[in-house]
Image (cartoon, rainbow, N blue to C red):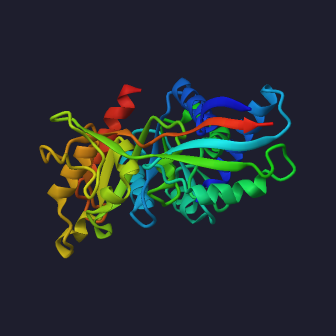
Amino acid sequence: MHELGITEEILNIAITKAREADSKKVLQINLVIGDASSIVGDCVQFCFDFVSRDTIAEGARLNFQRIPLQMKCRNCGNQFHPEKEPWVCPQCQRWEVDIIKGTEFYMESIEVD
Amino acid sequence: MKVTVLQNIMNANDKIAAKNQDILNQNKVFSINVMSSPGAGKTSLILETIKQLKDKCKICVIEADIASTMDADKIIKEGVPAVQINTGGECHTDANMFSAALDKLPLKEIDLLFLENVGNLVCPAEFRVGTRKGIMLLSVPEGDDKPYKYPLMFSTVDAVVISKMDYLSLSNFNLEQFEKTVKGMNPDVKIFRVSVKTGEGVPDWTGWLETQLKEI
């Protein structure tokens, strides 16, 4: 459970960017999270509602865009979204795959007033 | 109005981690972040390593736990300095906590520094702290299916120590399948089969550490 520390960082980034844009209120925060990340969106919103009190981001809504896990086989180059066994290539059955998408965790944009 | 941000949430942590790494490199300290689930044998492996290497190099340990100084006390008993970090409920050590612990150490005098992270296979994998290497232990009683459940940890470490090898005959743990899965996720990973109880594999592990120490 490290959502609290991460949420404080989200709040810092959002407030800094809002001030840079001379805005007085953060309305929405758009986050991109890969499916390989262990971050739980509901927990982040829950923490956010606490840590953002009395700041310009109080009451802001957090939107999460999830990026599905995407793998690439080192043997045959096949790219796939894993279903049951994520570490086996469905085309050549080799256990030689890398994650190429799904570990992202960044703030894409904010909506400000 | 929409404001584009495109900023990594872990940026602040990663910046401190990079600074920690610079400080350790300047002082020629070889550092290792030791991770595993609770009870996999991190402290036992570190204690055994101290026994084997303490006459060859100067070792220091940073112990991170949610609470207590039990692990640090065990290390100090072996005549090696230890600093205890209590994370106060946090599930991992972040770069900032590691930085605060480094401030308390005479880095110029240290050759080998262990960070024993909080027992957890999830969160420590997401927080870089700035050590030269990251390793994990997976003990035989935990089972060979763990790479599927904690892929981020298994795919990002430099070495996996299969600990408690003395339990192998009592379990269904499939060593070949496990190693194949881990190598599939992480082709450059080093794998050690170790039991600190019987001494199996300990020379391989300490030999690897000694090679790393020479390279720094």
Query: Is residue B86 among what the camera can see?
Result: no
Left or right side of B7 for B172: left
Q: Residue at the location (62% across, 60% down)? A: A43
Find residue A102 and report its image quarter.
top left
Query: Vertically, is B138 above or below B3?
Result: below
- Residue A87: where, in percent of width, then height? 25, 49
Q: Residue at the location (84% across, 46% down)? A: A55
- Residue B132: where, in percent of width, then height? 45, 34
Give whichever of A105, B175 is nearer the camera: A105
Left or right side of B202 for B114: right
Q: Residue at the location (60% across, 46% down)? A: B94
- Residue A53: where, in percent of width, then height? 83, 53
Find residue B200 and report its image quarter.
bottom left
Give whichever of A15, B42 is nearer the camera: A15
Query: Vertically, is A54 above or below B1?
Result: below
Left or right side of B58 for A79: left
Residue lying farthest to the bottom in this orientation: B170
Q: In which quarter of the image is the C terminus of chain B?
A: top left
Query: Vertically, is B96 above or below B38?
Result: above
Left or right side of B94 for A104: left
Q: Residue at the location (58% across, 55% down)? A: A41
Residue lying farthest to the top in this orientation: B26
Q: In which quarter of the image is the N terminus of chain B?
A: top right
Give whichever of A14, B195 is nearer the camera: A14
- Residue A6: where, in percent of width, then height? 64, 48
Residue lying farthest to the front in this orientation: B1
Give whichever of B34, B172 is nearer the camera: B172
Query: Is residue A53 among what the camera can see?
Result: yes
Query: Vertically, is A110 above or below A54?
Result: above
Q: How many labels does the image show?
A: 0
